[in-house]
Image (cartoon, grey):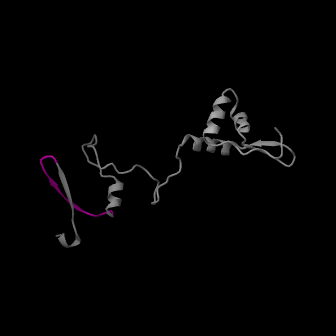
Amino acid sequence: MSKSNQPEPLTGQALLDKVKDLGNLSKEEKARECGYYTQTKNGVERVNMMKFLNALIDAEGIELDSTSTGQGRGGRSASYRISVQSNHNLLIGSAYTKKMGLEPGDEFEITLGRKHIHLRQLGEDEEE
């Protein structure tokens, strides 16, 4: 199909179906058959593998870019549960400290109950 007016590349489910049908072809041949190529002025076809692979990722619904609006790299969302680590420590993650606006050096008083632990932030006026 060496036409100058090439069709739009396949996307979404149509792309996934076509790739499945072309199971025995190479990656480059699949990309070309799905419309991911261009023709140079000299009539040479160039397969655009990056656009093809990105379209496959999008069609599969895989989210590679962080959709987080805050700063940072995304990460996990807060589950409001933690587990005792193998060294018997409890680690409170940054999701919680950021949500509370805590800064390095902020201090807390720990109160132990029968089955609970309370943390109370110490204010500047409460320090000794």
In the displayed structure, 117 sits above or below 34; it is: below
- Horizontally, residue 36 falls left or right of residue 43, namely left
Residue at horizontal 15 percent and vertical 46 percent from the top: 115
Residue at horizontal 73 percent and vertical 36 percent from the top: 33
Q: Residue furthest bottom?
A: 125
Image position, residue 118 (x, y; %):
18, 55
Q: Nearer the viewer, residue 45 or 82?
A: 45
In the displayed structure, 17 sits above or below 74; it is: above
- The reply to whether the magenta stretch includes residue 46 is no
Q: Nearer the viewer, residue 84 or 63?
A: 63
Q: Residue furthest right?
A: 42
Image position, residue 74 (x, y; %):
45, 53
- Horizontally, residue 120 falls left or right of residue 70, namely left
Most common SS among magenta residues: loop
Image position, residue 1 (x, y; %):
81, 38
Q: Nearer the viewer, residue 78 or 60?
A: 60
Query: What quarter of the picture does the C terminus occupy?
Result: bottom left
Residue at horizontal 70 percent and vertical 44 percent from the top: 9
Image position, residue 8 (x, y; %):
72, 45
Q: Quadrant of residue 22?
A: top right
Q: Residue furthest left?
A: 114
In the image, the segment drawn in magenta is 103-115
- Horizontally, residue 26 falls left or right of residue 102, namely right
